[in-house]
Amino acid sequence: MTAPLVTVRDLRVDFPGDVAAVRGVSFTVDPGTVVAIVGESGSGKSVTARSLVGLAGERATVRAKTLEFEGHDLTGLDPRGWRALRGRRVGFVLQDALASLDPLRRVGAEIAEPLREHRTVPSRQVRAEVERLLGEAGVPAPEVRARQYPHELSGGLRQRALIASALAARPDLLIADEPTTALDATVQRQVLRLLRARADEGTAILLITHDLGVVAEIADHVHVMRDGVFVEDGPARRVLEAPEHEYTRTLVGAAAGHRRATPPGEPAVVLRAENLVKTFRLPGKRVLRAVDGVSFDVEAGRTLGIVGESGSGKTTVGRLLMGLTRPDAGSVRLDGSAWTELRGRDLRQARRRVQMVYQHPLGSFDPRYTARRLLAEPLDVVGVPEAEQADRAAELLGQVGLSPDLLNRRGRELSGGQAQRLAIARALACDPDVIVADEPVSALDASVQAQVLDVFAEIQERRAVSYVFISHDLGVIRRLADRVAVMKDGRIVESGEMAQVFDAPAHPYTKELLDAVPTLRLNHL
Amino acid sequence: MAGVLKTGPAGNGAPAGTGRAELVRLVLLRAGGSAAVLWGAVTATFVLLRVMPGNTADVLMARSTTASAETRAQLIADYRLDESVGAQYLAYLGKTARGDFGDSYVLRRPVTEVLATQLPHTLLLVAATLVVTVAGAVVLAVLSARAGRVARSVFAGVESLLVAVPPFWLGLVLLTLFSFTLPIFPAVGSSSLSGLVLPTLTLAAGPLALVSGVLREGMLRALHEPFVLTARTRGISETAVHVRHVLRHALLPATSLLGWIGGSLLGGAVIIEIVFSRPGVGRLLLTSVQNKDLPVVIAVVLLSALVFVVFTIIVDVITWLVDPRTREAA
Amino acid sequence: MIRAIRPGLWPAVVLLVVLAAMAAVPGLFTGADPDAADLNATFAPPGPDHWLGTDENGRDLWARIVHGARPSLLIGGGAVAVALLGGAVVGVTAAQLGGLADQALSRSLEVLLSVPWLLLVFLVVAVMGPGTFPAMVGLALVSLPGFARVVRAEVLRLRAAPFVEAARGFGWSRLQVTVRHVVPNALGPVLALATVTLGATIVAGSSLSFVGLGPQPPTAEWGAMLAASRRTLSVAWWPAAFPGVALTLAVLAITAVGQELQRRADGRHL
């Protein structure tokens, strides 16, 4: 048993005029282990991590009974002392490497910065060392990549480069704050493996994340954080398999995803996509086939899940279903008539039958409108008399679990979860047959995601509305879908009943997706 | 030009090495666009000349009672007034492209000759103003970005005052204070160096305040970017953070603002020259406008359009050099 | 609207109201005749008889400044109104037609933008002759491209905005969506630009009369008053000071309100 590398006892961080961000947390990090702090946004997890390198912010007051690194007290450190620690002893990785690497500097210069600052290698060898580090982080052709700029690299390569820069001066501790949040599932998995490998070689890792799936993948020990305190601590396996605190149970439940029973019977088809093709012209005369021969049926009262990673064409499919873009070939038929055949009044009436819920609800609200006006607009269209609109609006809010008190608020005065519920209520106002939901929960925190998905499920049980759920998140799809279509590069590579696709995937890409998603592995623990 | 433009689409994601060729391509592309803008401007002035009552020769005749039939014939030949509008237009385009703006209606000397004596004074003022603007703005912005909240709002207040003050009145105030009340600088136009101080300060005040505000805002914004946090986690000093990461980002918006200012200073200089009774294009232009001496006015307008597009190209090149993200779009 | 005025903005708003009142009913603020010369009281310094002193003809400066508000503000206001209307027409046309027409319009605007504002106005005045109307036309031409660009960009942005798409999804016609969502949302940025431009244009207008190309004497106009004061700078400072203060205050107030409108249009509240 070696001495812990980091010891934190009773850490408190205050910001003037705010409630305390961190209210007394204690933990240790040992060499060669991965310690995770899990929490939702605003829980204080990032502030905790930044306090360890003295970057909690200019206005923050940091106090602790013990704040030690290798037995050295950090509480009284001067700026010079902090600088000697940062980069050299503690490396730091932030989420979204596009914003975290200086866009105006070459990748190599960013990685070389800690090397030059701490002079860990002679300056003549910096270039070779940078390439070695990139290679070590799993970046192919490092000599080329080092001379490129961050925006020229894919998300996965950028994150690897950022990790390489954090590890450049061989720190003993790596703090990774949401290191994979901006990445697709398959890439996320590779990056997590890279981090685990570093831990196995002896680097201590403090992982900050909102995603229990990520914890399940690589953490040894986990602290669950909420409102500035740890509500539960323990070995990762124990916490995930037998959560003791109620909040942890909510998080685990949200991450695992409950399966719902598929309604029996042979349902009718409401919306049919036939051989849809949509191409976009790119600069330089290249053509992107965003949607390339896609066909499927949306059945009455059931949910079709469309899964795919970013760039797979799923969002374009959504717009085609709404009749907002014309397909280059093929058609979308609502009860047998194609969007392209409808004109004028018929078209406008048909539009009401297919409604959309967007990823970012605020963007879909007129910024000047209150909730009342947002709901009144579709009610106007379907001819609800003005006298009844107030009652109907309150009723719609009730259906999505919102209080009528919110009617006078504008979109930006609502929380993310409230805004998305309002968006659902608005979509219901036209009494549609189909709701197309494009990544409706991916901008929300995990526990809020679960609540919003519950709202979707309850509504479908109450009225026979069909959903088309477009998501990159297999957990979300698993929660709601009856049938699943897996998209890759504009084509559907596999489709079928949900259970069949998830339990016995036929296409290699589907298998890869399922393997990559940490949340689902959790179920098999 | 067309042959140059057809070099085909840029190799996407191609690593460094093609940089210089890309830059040349950018400059040629922008120069092409600028040529189109200038052509538009020349064409517009041709239309203006035609809109004026009577043809050019008539205007000239009306002003000169002594013109002989010979002079008249010469003018008609010069401007091809006996030919079709198309031919006149082509002749005008050709002359303008060669830098021949015709003769002043009033002074009856070639416009180019008239301008040549006045332009250097104006260009000197513009150049001095640019230097003061850039140097002053950088110093002010760096000082104020690192200052506290209160000091920063004082800076911002002074800046909005400087932007709001009408330059010609600022000139009057400075004259009253430093030439009449305290006789430090000469009051009436002089081409000496001390005579340049007040006009330069007057002309630079507004641009300096604008640029420094934009620079500071850019620096403050960049300071909150994740890449600055990342840079700090590497243990580098605050000065290094500012120099390597922050300032560069702030330079981008400031450069494009500066380009726009540089292009329009020629206009501001005209008023300032009048306030300070300095020699230069200002006085000449004012009398020309009052006398409807279109060739002179048009020449200055076209020259300043040329200066403007040159500044635009310079800004594009600087942006290209500083910001790799714009290179693919170009 | 009123409840939302920030405390720091009140002086600007009050000043604007006062200026507007001066321009509309100058009699409210002074009983003196702005053009009445009094050769016994030339260059009277500021004092109880003449608050702001008198000029070289013994005319009361306060009265001249009050009466000067209308011509001084009118050129700017008129020019901005014309530019806004013209810019809106050009911007909407460009956005709606798209393609080659859009390109051609955008290039033409660039030609206008490539000429410094003063020279553009000079060109117009050289053709039309000096006076209030030519100055207004010239200044309108200067700010028209800015409005056209903002209107064009707003129309394009709003046409693709998810909330506009959502409204189409409810089955509104194009016209209904435009009236309900596009126009009201575009109005914010356009009005903000108009206010900020107004400040700059008022200065530009007074610069023109300063060099003698705007309203002709003896009109009490701030720029023209400053021009006259230049000849007597060594004798008296007040004729050169107060009209400039009035002008600067007007521009500061208008710009402050404009910047606040801009912040709101950008959705940055308080």
Image (spheres, grey):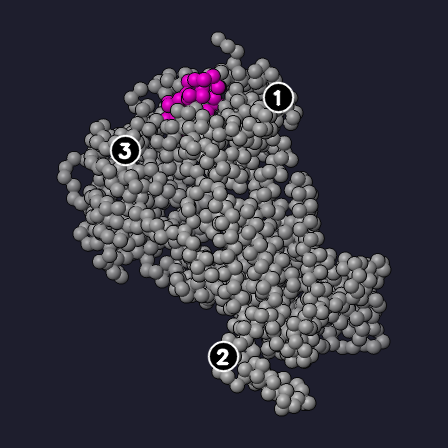
Residue B87: give its label: 2
**Residue A51 appears in which quarter of the rendering?**
top right
| Residue nearest the viewer, comparing A346 with B300 | B300
Q: Is residue A130 above or below residue C85?
A: above
Q: Position of residue C31 (x, y in %)?
A: 73, 72
Q: Is residue A523 above or below residue C121?
A: above
Residue A509: give its label: 3
Magenta residues, start to end: A196-222
Q: Amino acid at mark 3?
A: Tyr
**Residue in the picture at 24% in, 43% down:** A466
Q: Position of residue A495 (x, y in %)?
A: 22, 37
Q: Position of residue A492 (x, y in %)?
A: 24, 40
Label 1, on which residue?
A: A75
Give me the C-alpha separation between circle 1 and circle 2.
84 Å
| Residue nearest the viewer, comparing A142 with A95 | A142
| B165 sits left or right of A72 in the view | right
Residue farthest to the bottom, as pictured? B69
Subunit bearing disc 2? B
| A465 sits left or right of A174 in the view | left
Is residue A419 part of the magenta span, yes or no? no
